[in-house]
Image (spheres, rainbow, N blue to C red):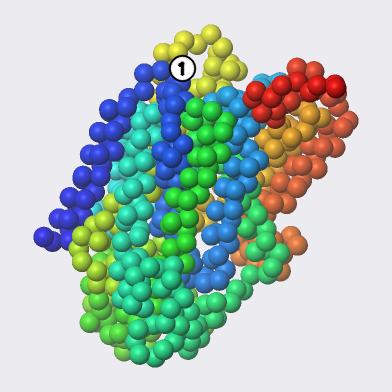
Amino acid sequence: METQTLIYLFVGISFALYIGIAIWSRAGSTKEFYVAGGGVNPVVNGMATAADWMSAASFISMAGLIAFLGYDGSVYLMGWTGGYVMLALLLAPYLRKFGQFTVPDFIGTRYYSSAARVVAVICLIFISFTYIAGQMRGVGIVFSRFLDVPIDLGVIIGMGIVFVYAVLGGMKGITYTQVAQYCVLIFAYMVPAFFISFLVTGNPIPQLGLGSTVNDGSGMYVLERLDLVLQDLGFGPYTEGSKSMIDVFCITAALMIGTAGLPHVIVRFFTVPKASDARKSAGWALVFIALLYTTAPAVGAFARINFVDTVNEQSYADAPEWFTNWEANDLIAFSDKNGDGVMQYRAGDAFAGSPNFTGETGPSGERLVDNAPNADSANEVYVDRDIMVLANPEIANLPGWVIALVAAGGLAAALSTAAGLLLVISASISHDLLKRTFKPNISERGELMAARIAATAAIFVAGYLGIYPPGWVAQVVAFAFGLAAASLFPAIFMGIFSKRMNKEGAIAGMVTGLAFTFLYIAYFKLWNPDANVAANWFLGISPEGIGVIGMLLNFAVALIVSRMTASPPIEVRRLIDSIRVPRGAGAASTH
C-alpha cells in the first residue's frame, strides 16, 4: 500500500475511535461535563492526564528543540517533568479534598470574594489561549504535510474535530478519549524511536542508544560524533549550552511552577473518587509521561545526525524525497547562494525570517524565496524545528506504516490538549462567571448550554491564533507556563498553606504577577524583538524564564498587602484546617 493511503487509513481509524468514544460516553449532567462524574480509576486518570499534558509541544516540538538547541533544550525536559512532583505533593490532594470543579472556584471560595474569582478567570483564559495557540499550530502542521492541505485549512479541520468531541462529550468524553489518544501517541513516538536507535547504534532502546557507539565502524559515541560533525560545520558543540546558569535555572523553575499552576492539569485531579487517589494518579501520570520524556533527547540527537547526513553536501537534484515533500509545505527551503546546486548546511540562518516563496523554481528545481540572503553565513538550508519528529521516520527511510503512525500520533497529541483546554475555558465562563458570579439562578440545562456556547466561541479564537501564531510551538507554550507561574500558582499555594492570606492580598498579587510577566514577554517578543538579547534582559533572565520573577513579585505583594488589611473570617480559617487534616483523624486528646 502507498504511504499516503496508509496515512488516511491510520488517521481515519484513530478519529473514528475518538468520536465513537465521545458519543458512547456523552455527558448528561454538568458534573459529568466538568469532572467526568468524579469516578475515574487512578491508573486510567494517570493515562488521561499524561495525554492531556503531552501536547503538540511535547510530541512535535520538544525533540525538535533538543535537536537544534542541544544541551540548552534540557530545560524543557527538567521543567516539564519536575512540575509533576510539585503538583502531586503540594497541590493535587488538597484541591481534591476541597472538592470544587475549577481553579477559580477554589480561589473564589478560599478568598471569599467574587472579585478574586473573576481575576482568576481572567488569568486562566489568558494562559489557556496562549497555550492553545501552540496546539492549533501543531494540528495545522501535521494536517498540511500528511493530508496535503495548506496549514490554514489544516487548522480549520482540527477545529471541527475538537468541536465534535469537546462540545458534545465534555470531561467524560475527553477522559476516555484521552486514554485512547495516549496509547496512540506513545506508540507513535516509541516505534520510530526503536527503529532509528537500532539503525544508528544497533541498540533498539533509545534511552540506551543515546549513550552507545555509532555503528559506522568509527567506534565513536553518538554525542561525540554529533559534537564533532556540528563543530566541523561551524555550530557550537551539541553537549555544551550557551545559556547562562541563572537563565537555565529560571526557565526550568518557570516551567515547573507553571506546570503546578496549569488549570487543565489541575482539573484532572478532581475526576478521581478520593484525595489519596489524586496522589496515585499523579504518580501514574509521571510514569506515562517519563516514557516519552526520556526518549526525546535520543530522538532529537538521532534526528540531527540523520538530518546532517542526508542534507549536507547533497546536490538538490538528488535531494531525498522527504526534503521536497516538506519543501512543498513551506517548512524547508534551500537558497542556493553560490549557484552550485549543492546544499550546504552550516551554522547561522540561511536568510532573514521564515521563507517567503515566490512561486518560481530555480535552476536545480528548488522553490525560490525572495528573502534577503544572510551574507554572514554560508548556510543554504532553512528548516522549521517543529518538523523534526514528524520528518524523522522519512529521513531514516522507515516503512510507510511508521510514517502513518507518526501522523496519527502527532494529531492525537495536539487534539487531546486542545480539547482539555477548551473545556477549562468553557467551564470557567459558564460555571465561574455565570453560575457562581453573575447568574446564580441558572438551571443545570442552561449551564450546560452556556458551557457548549463558550466552548464553540473559544474554538474560533483558538483557530484564529493557530493561523496567525506568535512563534514556535514550544516557545508559545513556554510563555503560557510563565504566566501560570506568575499568576495562579502563588494564589493556590498560599490558599492552602497560609491562614493569614486574605482576598486583598491574593487579588493584588495575581494582578501584579500577571501584569509584570505579560508586559515583559510582550516587550521583548512583540513590541521590540530586536532588543531581545541577554544584555538587555532583567538580571540576564530571558522572557521564557521571567515567570519566576513574576511569581516572587506576586508572593511579595500578596504578603505585604495581606499584612496591612483585615485577616480572613474564622470560617475560612476553619476551611483551611479541614483541607489539611487527613480525613478520619480524630481530635487531639489532652491526656
Q: Is residue 492 above or below residue 322?
A: above
- The residue that mark 1 highlights is 447
Viewer-side residue, 193 vs 341: 193
Q: Amino acid at mark 1?
A: Glu
Classify mark 1: residues with Cα within 10 Å, few (<14), some (14-19) or many (20+). many
Q: Is residue 24 left or right of residue 275?
A: left
The residue lying furthest to the front in this view is 591
Report the residue at 64% width, 52% height from top.
Answer: 254
Report the residue at 67% width, 58% height from top.
Answer: 250
> Where residue 262 sits: x, y (%)?
56, 41
Report the residue at 24% width, 48% height from top.
Answer: 11
Report the residue at 50% width, 49% height from top.
Answer: 286
Viewer-side residue, 411 vs 130: 411
> Where residue 268 sits: x, y (%)?
49, 35
Residue 186 visible in the snapshot? yes
Q: Is residue 293 above or below residue 392?
A: above
Q: Quadrant of the C terminus?
A: top right
Q: Is residue 555 left or right of residue 335?
A: right
> Where residue 45 sits: x, y (%)?
44, 37
Q: Is residue 92 left or right of residue 330?
A: right
The residue lying furthest to the left in this view is 1
Picture quarter containing residue 2? bottom left
Residue 322 visible in the snapshot? no
> Where residue 1 sits: x, y (%)?
11, 60
Viewer-side residue, 133 vs 18: 18
Judged from the image, the secondary structure of the residue bearing numbered disc 1 is: helix
- For the image, the number of numbered tags is 1
Q: Is residue 194 above or below residue 95?
A: below
The residue lying furthest to the right in this view is 564
